Image (tube, rainbow, N blue to C red):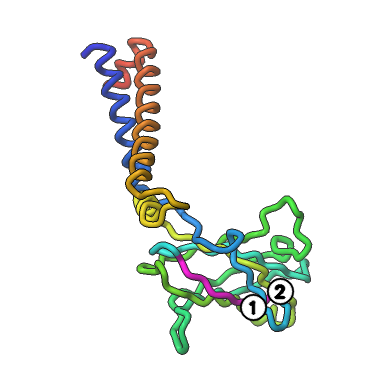
Amino acid sequence: MTRRRWAAMVGVAVAVALVAAVLLVPVEVRHSAPFGFRLTLDDERGIAVMSGRVRPNYDDFNRLDLDLRAYIVESDYDLSITIRPDRRGAAAIRTIPLSVRGTDIRHNKDPLQDPFLTVRFPPIPDSAGKRYSILVQTGPRNRDDIITLWSMKTYSAVPGRAVVGALLDDPPGDVAPNALRVVLGALLVGFAGAVGWLTAGLVALLPVGRRAELHE
């Protein structure tokens, strides 16, 4: 097999693998929310509360990012996070225990640090478009400690094709779905082709002995 043909085959394989990865490999996608997160503010009392409601955009809801604030930073906190459908009498579908140090969720966080604490749990199937209630409770040793939940973000683990499909179903602004398909398809193929071409060029530059080792 000639050097050029071998390099071309490697480049094509890399390009195909890249397209497959983009479309098939699950990625965590944040759900839509005002400001990118949901506040847990009780408007009537003007205080942050330990619960909130969310509506995932995608199936397989699997992650919460919580902005928790502890006012006794020397304590360790035992928390329980409960997720249930947002309807009266609904049973909990996920209960996640969480132990966290007060220094990690201190009330006076540095303005430059990420204020959110990430919590993952087994994906909730068929979650797209459904409302869920999120409740954070303290454990027995923290009953008298002051802790608040300021805001939260939610995510789903979905394959790339689901994200592309959602974008095509509801394109931004006045963009026509067909035009968006062409643009996205061209970008994906162009990017994969560029990576494949670069890979083929690098393989072609390898010393003969090294290429033989790779071939074996």
Q: In front of the other: label 2 or label 1?
A: 2
- Residue 52 lies in the magenta-colored region: yes
Is residue 188 left or right of 152 when viewed as pictured? left
Q: Identify residue for label 1.
A: 138
Q: Identify residue for label 2.
A: 147
In the picture, the quarter occupied by the C terminus is top left
The local crowd at label 2, few if under 14, some if 14 to 19, many if 20 or more residues have their Cα within 10 Å, is: many
Is residue 111 left or right of 31 when viewed as pictured? right
Is residue 155 left or right of 44 when viewed as pictured? left
For the residues labelled 2 and 1, the Cα–Cα distance comes to 8 Å
Q: Are marks 2 and 1 in contact (CB under 8 Å)?
A: yes
| Rendering coords of residue 16 (x, y %) | 30, 34
Above or below residue 2? Residue 161 is below
In the displayed orientation, state which residue is furthest to the left: 1
| Rendering coords of residue 132 (x, y %) | 48, 75
Above or below residue 132? Residue 29 is above
In the picture, the quarter occupied by the N terminus is top left
The quadrant in which residue 140 appears is bottom right
Residue at x 55%, y 74% (from the top left corner): 81
**Residue nearer the viewer, 35 or 180:** 180
Q: What residue type is labelled 2?
A: Ile
Magenta segment: 48-56
Residue 188: numbered disc:
none
Residue at x 34%, y 34% (from the top left corner): 189
